[in-house]
Image: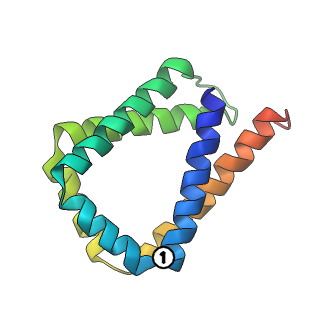
């Protein structure tokens, strides 16, 4: 089950990264709308916390293998969710300052595409026993 979460997160990053690369102005507007809604930011934090906890409870494997990527993503989601829920103001401030510098949008898009491709490949490799 956790491996399927890896695939879903990978696809989300891959598709989101391509969309961000092709339509950076739209994503800037989305981020503006997002940071203007405390309820939406809180919901994001809650979802990140839930997903992170789910991954950690079901797949907390610390060994030198591609499976550690799932564990790291779980902990990252849990920590991000906690940060958003416990200190929403600093999180929103960081998001706004990052997106105020328009030059980062394409760079972040490329990073998301690469991470998404790695996760999708890792799922395929784990599922088919290539690794």
- Is 21 in front, or is 115? 21
Mark 1 lies on a secondary structure that is helix
Q: Residue at x 41, y 38 (%)?
A: 77
Quadrant for the N terminus, please.
top right
- The 10 Å Cα crowd at callout 1, few under 14, some 14 to 19, many 20 or more, is some
Which residue is located at x 69 percent, y 48 percent? 120
Image vertical order of residue 89 relative to residue 2, above or below: below
Q: Residue furthest top?
A: 57
Q: Is residue 2 left or right of residue 29?
A: right
As rendered, which of 101 and 24 lies closer to the eye? Answer: 24
In the image, residue 119 above or below residue 69: below
Residue 105 visible in the displayed image? yes
Q: Is residue 101 above or below residue 81?
A: below
Where residue 26 appears, as percent x and y from the top left, is 39, 76
The residue at the point 57 percent across, 23 percent down is 59
- Residue 53: quarter of image: top left
88 vs 3, left or right, is left
Counting from the top left corner in percent of width and height, residue 62 is at 58, 25
- Image-quadrant location for residue 4: top right
At 26% from the left and 75% from the top, the residue drawn is 100
Q: For this view, does 126 lie left or right of residue 43? A: right
Q: Which residue is mark 1?
A: 106
Q: How is the image coloured?
A: rainbow
Farthest residue toward the left? 89
């Amino acid at each position: 089950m956790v491996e399927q979460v890896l695939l879903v997160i990978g696809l989300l990053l891959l598709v989101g990264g391509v969309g961000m690369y092709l339509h950076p102005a739209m994503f800037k507007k989305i981020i503006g709308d997002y940071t203007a809604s405390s309820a939406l930011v809180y919901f994001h934090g809650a979802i990140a916390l839930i997903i992170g906890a789910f991954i950690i409870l079901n797949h907390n494997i610390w060994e030198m293998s591609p499976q550690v990527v799932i564990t790291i993503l779980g902990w990252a989601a849990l920590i991000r969710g906690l940060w958003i829920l416990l200190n929403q103001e600093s999180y929103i401030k960081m998001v706004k300052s990052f997106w105020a510098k328009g030059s980062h949008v394409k760079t972040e898009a490329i990073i998301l595409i690469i991470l998404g491709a790695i996760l999708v490949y890792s799922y395929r490799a784990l599922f088919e026993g290539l690794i």
